[in-house]
Amino acid sequence: MREIITFKSLPAPRFRYSPCVKTGPFYEFAGMIGLDLSGRLHNGGVSGETRQILENLVNASHEIGLSLQNLVSATIYTTKFEEFPAINKVWEEFFHEGTPPPARTSIGVAALPLGATVEISFRLYK
């Protein structure tokens, strides 16, 4: 059984895709870029975009009764791989002592949607 999940706490998709698909106990979140609720890209570079993405994930997860404790894996894409330490610094604000980090893959890319420098996709388990 496949269920499409939408959120009040996330900006509406600009293209034709599902923000999240639930299959069994898994929630697959489409890649998120650092958009605020109005749909504007955060202007804080890799740090600001990463923080916005993770805040969006936390808010959306709470809407469906989940938390970062349910996060199984994340895939990070960035056009600024040389600035990956800044992404890690923000990541560690969310995955500090007591919050086990998920499995993670990081990939350098040439471009991302809407001029973003970071995009992250997530998989959660309930």
Image: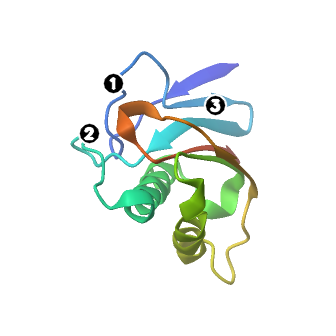
Mark 3 Cα shell of 10 Å, populated few (<14), some (14-19), many (≥20): some
**Number of the label disc, if any, that sits on residue 34:** none
Is 66 or 84 nearer to us in this picture? Answer: 84
Residue 108 location, x and y as percent? 64, 45
* Label 2 – label 1 distance at C-alpha: 9 Å
Q: Mark 1 and mark 2 in contact (Cβ < 8 Å)?
A: yes
Q: Amino acid at mark 1?
A: Arg
* Label 1 – label 3 distance at C-alpha: 20 Å
Is 29 or 76 nearer to us in this picture? Answer: 76
Q: Mark 2 and mark 3 in contact (Cβ < 8 Å)?
A: no
Q: Secondary structure at mark 1?
A: loop
Relative vertical location of residue 47 with respect to residue 108 in this rendering, above or below: below
Closer to the N terminus: mark 2 or mark 1? 1
Residue 4 location, x and y as percent? 53, 24
In the image, farthest residue toward the left:
38
Closer to the N terminus: mark 3 or mark 2? 3
Q: Which residue is at 63% across, 31% downward?
A: 22
In the image, farthest residue toward the top:
16
Residue holding disc 3? 22
Relative vertical location of residue 57 with respect to residue 18 in this rendering, above or below: below
Residue holding disc 2? 39
Instruction: Look at discs 3 and 2 and give the one toward the viewer.
Output: 2
Residue holding disc 1? 14
Q: Is residue 113 visible?
A: yes
Q: Amino acid at mark 2?
A: Gly
